[in-house]
Structures are given as C-alpha cells and as structure tokens.
Image (tube, grey):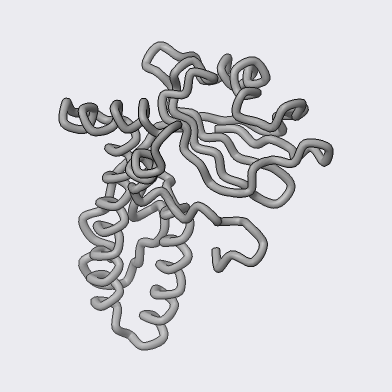
Amino acid sequence: MLDLADDPGHPLPQERAYHYLDPRTAGRNVLTVPFRGGLRGDVQCRPDDDPDALGEAAADWLTGLLPEGHACSVTWSSHYRFQQVVADRLTDAYGRVLIAGEAGHLFAPFGARGLNSGIADAAAATAALSTGDVSEYAHAGHRAALLNRRAAGRALAHLTAPTPWHRAAQRPAAAAAPRSDRAGRRLDSAPYGPRDAGIPGSRY
C-alpha cells in the first residue's frame, strides 16, 4: 500500500478503480483510490514479492497506471496481510467490558469497512452505556461485523480468484474488458466501495 502525491500538471484519476492482472504492473492486481491531495495504491503482492522492495521501486512499475508525465512521488508506503476475523462476542460475560473497532474485528479494507464500522461501534457503545442496554450492542455489533466480513470476503475472492470457478469467470472478463463494458462491469461488481468516493459532490 502506498500514497502518491498529486501532480498539478498531470492530475490523478478521480475515481476508485481496480486494475486486474495489469500488464503495466507485471500482472499484479492494483486498487487505486483518490483522496485529497493524492492517490492511494493498494497492490496485491505475489507470494515471492518483497513488499518493501516493491514499494521502493514503485516509480518503475506504477507509472503506467498514472497520467502520462506524472511525477509518481511516493509519500508513504507500508504492507499488511488481509485478515477476516470477528471476535466471538463484543462484551465480556458480565457486560462490563465492551469491545469496539479492530479489537473486535479485522477485515480486508475494501470500502474502509474497518474504520467505518469502528466508528459505528464507538457510537453504538456510547449509546449502550447511556441506556444500559449492553446486550443489544453485543448482538447488533456482532451481526454487523459478520455482515462486513462476508462482504469483504466476497470482494477479496472476486479479486484473488482462489478457485477454478472464480478464475473461469474472472480471466475471460479481464481479457474482454478493454472492448466490453459488460465485462468491465463484471470485474467491478464486488463490494469494494463506491467508485466516486472522494470526488467533490459525491455522497461519499
């Protein structure tokens, strides 16, 4: 994962996009998401990749996804492993300890589900403490976490194509996408988060 500074002379794309098995990135999958002042690139590493070296060499392999002439100035990079984990319960047995955010669930970060659900957890926990209805927080929060895990899992499976069935659907669509809007929509149909996140005027 890396952040790129915007280049005023060569503005960055202003929509979220997935690049499947892109030859410009040596066949890696890359998610790009705009934010104020730049672009975030989320690269799916191969098993034999060195994430640190990949980040340091970003200007060599990422440039093809950017507007021609873009400076490709990397301001930050890091790496992480996708997790799909939900705690068995979001309170202790006595309802005195409430678990929120990443203490209670870890997701692949499609649609900023971890951050967004963590904020919702904090608001729900505050309401539960004010009303004394801790059990409802535990049940509703757990249901929401499982829903987010399923959605992020669907997006992850759509991206990584872990089974022959997934690959049989993904690879022909990826080959046809440059000429077929329908194939492109098929590739973008998983719950990654809205395409227009971060664009002025968008509800996101």
145 or 10, which lies in front? 10
**Residue 75 can be seen, yes or no:** yes
What x and y, as percent, mark residue 117?
41, 61
Q: Quadrant of residue 166?
A: top left
Residue depicted at 34% across the width and 35% down the height:
159
What x and y, as percent, mark residue 147?
26, 59
In the image, residue 197 sits, relative to residue 59, either above or below, namely: below
Residue depicted at 33% across the width and 85% down the height:
132
Residue depicted at 28% across the width and 44% down the height:
153
Residue depicted at 21% across the width and 55% down the height:
88
Q: Is residue 133 left or right of residue 61?
A: left
In the image, residue 68 sits, relative to residue 48, either above or below, namely: below
What x and y, as percent, mark residue 52?
56, 19
Q: Residue furthest top?
A: 48
What x and y, as percent, mark residue 85?
28, 46
Q: Quadrant of the N terminus?
A: top right
55 or 81, which lies in front? 55
Q: Quadrant of residue 164?
A: top left
Q: Residue furthest right?
A: 9
**Residue 92 can be seen, yes or no:** no
Q: Residue furthest front?
A: 179
In the image, residue 60 sits, relative to residue 175, either above or below, namely: above
Q: Quadrant of the C terminus?
A: bottom right
Q: Residue furthest bottom?
A: 131
Q: Is residue 148 left or right of residue 33?
A: left
Q: How many marks?
A: 0
In the image, residue 188 sits, relative to residue 204, either above or below, namely: above
120 or 64, which lies in front? 64
